[in-house]
Image: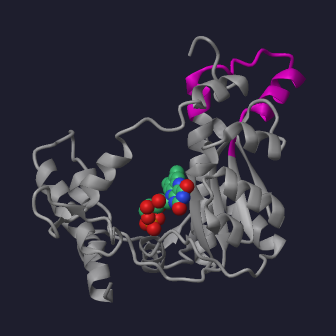
């Protein structure tokens, strides 16, 4: 994407012109340019090809520590991370996550877990009951973990590292729990490959801002127009190469495969249907939730 198009996409001129930006925060000079921060955020792309070079332990610690600075519900910090560097363990995890080769390649695989076990210990130490078997507690932990992992992702990208989230960690959760020795009240929510990128994939366009930002109340009036606009934009990239659909009765002719077809196919069937059971086994959901 050209630089000009980039700035147009993030609508910065409008924002910068209207906003009265402060030059201090918490009484200190702003040390990072908002433009640089926005440029970093807008240049995110998932990396699925890595150099084998290992990452210094201190770098991984610094990245996770940045994750820890994220907001967390009531400061409960209901998540943990298992950093896997061992090649054999990464190969096993790659297999369990749907045979995703980038987990084998990346020198570090972070497994972000919802973790209510520390609170369980706090409850024991203070001789209080722990009402953990409710959906709300799991949601608190899932949101906490997601905020922390995204903070960590940004920190990693600010160092020039690449990352890719791995929802495939929930394909075989019981095996992952056994492999990583996760105790009761700990559940592997999302994985994250981390390493030096060995490719620069194209930036995946996002939905038009008007499709996701509603002012004052939810407004679907332009939804179809916006979805079709995005569908065409995505179809024009080479992201869905070789996925064109044959036109019935017209041999050799193909229809574009865009985001609408991709998204609709993705949600046409239920996925990972044992999760409720595994969450119960790990103590996250009781009979009544
Ligand atoms: C929770 C979550 C789970 C994901 N799981 C996977 C995965 O298992 N494998 C993978 O290659 N990408 C995975 N992704 C990456 C998405 O496919 C990717 O973010 C999306 O296609 C947008 O592309 P971009 O990140 O390059 O902008 C996941 C992303 C999220 C947020």
Say which of 289 and 200 sits in front: 200
Residue 150 occupies quadrant: bottom right
* Place of residue 203 in the rendered image (x, y in percent of width and height, measured from the top left): 39, 75
Quick check: 233 above or below 76?
Answer: below
Quadrant containing the C terminus is top right
- Judged from this view, the residue extending furthest toward the right is 125
Residue at 40%, 78% in the rendered image: 202
* Place of residue 56 in the rendered image (x, y in percent of width and height, measured from the top left): 81, 76
Residue 237 in the figure: left or right of residue 282:
left
Quadrant containing the N terminus is bottom left
Quick check: 229 above or below 56?
Answer: above
Residue at 79%, 30% in the rendered image: 184
Residue 201 in the figure: left or right of residue 198:
left
Residue 13 occupies quadrant: bottom left
Instruction: Identify the colour scheme used.
Output: one colour
Residue at 41%, 72% in the rendered image: 42
* Place of residue 245 in the rendered image (x, y in percent of width and height, measured from the top left): 23, 61
Residue 280 occupies quadrant: top right
* Place of residue 195 in the rendered image (x, y in percent of width and height, measured from the top left): 67, 74
**Residues drawn in magenta:** 113-139
Q: Is residue 15 magenta?
A: no
């Amino acid at each position: 994407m050209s630089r000009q198009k980039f700035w147009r996409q993030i609508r910065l001129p409008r924002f910068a012109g209207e906003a009265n930006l402060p030059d201090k925060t918490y009484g200190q000079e702003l040390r990072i340019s908002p433009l640089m921060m926005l440029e970093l955020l807008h240049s995110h792309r998932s990396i699925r090809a890595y150099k084998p070079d290992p990452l210094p332990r201190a770098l991984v610690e610094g990245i996770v520590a940045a994750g820890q600075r994220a907001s967390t519900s009531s400061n409960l910090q209901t998540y943990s991370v298992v950093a896997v560097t061992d090649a054999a363990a990464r190969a096993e995890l790659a297999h369990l996550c749907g045979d995703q080769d980038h987990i084998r390649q990346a020198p570090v695989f972070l497994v972000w877990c919802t973790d209510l076990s520390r609170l369980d210990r706090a409850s024991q130490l203070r001789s209080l009951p722990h009402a953990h078997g409710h959906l709300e507690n799991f949601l608190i932990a899932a949101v906490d973990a997601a905020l922390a992992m995204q903070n960590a992702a940004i920190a990693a990208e600010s160092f020039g590292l690449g990352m890719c989230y791995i929802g495939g960690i929930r394909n075989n959760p019981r095996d992952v729990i056994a492999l990583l020795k996760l105790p009761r009240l700990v559940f592997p929510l999302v994985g994250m490959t981390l390493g030096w990128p060995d490719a620069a994939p194209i930036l995946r366009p996002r939905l038009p801002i008007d499709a996701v930002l509603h002012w004052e109340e939810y407004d679907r009036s332009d939804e179809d127009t916006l979805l079709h606009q995005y569908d065409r934009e995505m179809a024009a990239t080479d992201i869905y190469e070789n996925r064109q659909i044959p036109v019935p009765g017209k041999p050799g002719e193909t229809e574009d495969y865009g985001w609408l077809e991709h998204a609709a196919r993705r949600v046409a069937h239920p996925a990972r249907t044992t999760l409720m059971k595994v969450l119960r086994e790990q103590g996250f959901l009781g009979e009544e939730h």
